[in-house]
Amino acid sequence: MTFDVGAFMLQSVPFARTLDITFDRIEPGLAVARMPDRPDLRNHVGGPHAGALFTLAESASGAAMLSAFGDQLTRATPLAVSAAIRYVKLALGEVVAEARLAASREEVVARLDAGERPEFEVAVTVGTADGTPVCEVNVTWTLRPNR
């Protein structure tokens, strides 16, 4: 990777900065992001608001996607196509999202090379700081060829 994916994400997605999201680790096809426990981010039962959890997961998925395809930005624009979230347990305290590219980089780039608009999944698990899972998110991304 020739650029700092975490810094790029925080610069291009101001809402992630609003939530104080940080990136612990970014490797090709993998990103780990963290969101602190703040009273203004909590819901009516004391955990992070569903929207804040979703933003953390979507931000982590974007970083995982960019870590694999950042070198394609001169010819394609990454866009989230859809997302599904499943809440499994109330989160209390700081939360951590781990996002993994579920597709082969080679297959996605080959489809882009063929003039297609590839779609691919990034799977995200969000948990508490001690590792207790709180939600699962699947984000479908595409690389839209630039015209």
Image: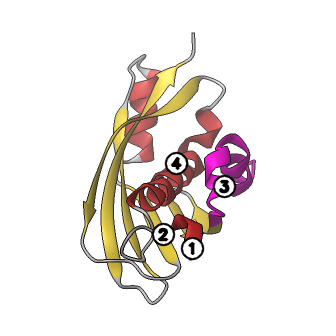
> Contact, CB < 8 Å: mark 2 with mark 1?
yes
Amino acid tagged 1: Pro
x, y percentage for residue 25? 61, 69
**14 versus 64 height, above or below:** above
| Name of the residue lying farthest toward the top | 147
Label 2 element class: loop
Which of the two labelled residues, at mark 4 and mark 3, occupies the earlier sequence position? Answer: 3
Residue 17 seen in this snapshot: yes
Residue 122, percent from left and from top:
38, 52
Instruction: Find the distance from the CA under tag 4 to the CA under tag 1.
Output: 26 Å
What residue would you read off at disc 2? Answer: 42
Per the image, the residue denoted by label 1 is: 39
Mark 4–mark 3 Cα distance, whole angstroms, equals: 17 Å
In the picture provided, is 8 more to the left or to the right than 114? right
Q: CA distance from mark 2 to mark 1?
A: 5 Å
The amino acid type of the residue labelled 3 equals Thr
Please tell me whether mark 3 or mark 1 is closer to you in this view. Answer: 1
Q: Is residue 144 left or right of residue 12?
A: left
Q: Secondary structure at mark 1?
A: helix
